[in-house]
Amino acid sequence: MSQLFVCTVGELPDGEARKVEYTPDIALFHCDGEFFAVDDRCSHGNASISEGYLEDNATVECPLHTASFCLRTGRALCLPATDPLKTYPVVVKDGNIYITVSEEQ
């Protein structure tokens, strides 16, 4: 496991998301003071989750298919998606945001 530096806390305002170029790409969200990271690709189709609609209850709606996902667990909350998104641990240290990734990806 390694930690991937993404940005500082001040660079990602609450209610915003950022696409992190990695293999696979990761979506980082700042929601109600918490940070969440999930696969950036909708499990239902070819859409970027980082471009989705962030909800107050730590969910995101796919911008293309209206499927919703829990950012805490990655679980698909409604159709058309049925498969979850992979989640990644997020660490905030000294004002910097890191995503924990597996070196085997």
Image (cartoon, rainbow, N blue to C red):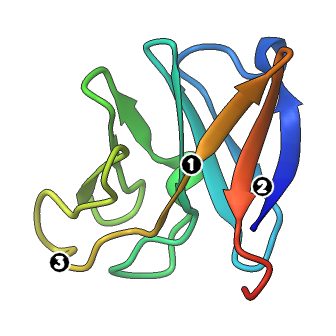
- For marks 2 and 1, give the CA distance: 12 Å
**Closer to the N terminus: mark 3 or mark 2?**
2
Q: Which residue is mark 2?
A: 20
Q: Badges 1 and 3: C-beta atoms under 8 Å apart? A: no
Q: Nearer the viewer, residue 73 or 67?
A: 73
Q: Residue at x 58, y 63 (%)?
A: 40
Could you tell which of marks 2 and 1 lies nearer the N-terminus?
2
Q: Residue at x 30, y 20 (%)?
A: 56
Q: What residue does disc 3 label? A: 82
Dot placed on the residue nearer the N-terminal end, 1 or 3: 1
The numbered disc on residue 9 is none
Residue in the picture at 79% in, 24% down: 93
Q: How many residues crowd around disc 2 within 10 Å: few (fewer than 14), some, or many (20 or more)? A: many
In the image, taking residue 55 as reference, residue 49 lies left or right, namely: right
Q: Residues within 10 Å of mark 3 (few under 14, many from 20)?
A: some
- Element under disc 3: loop
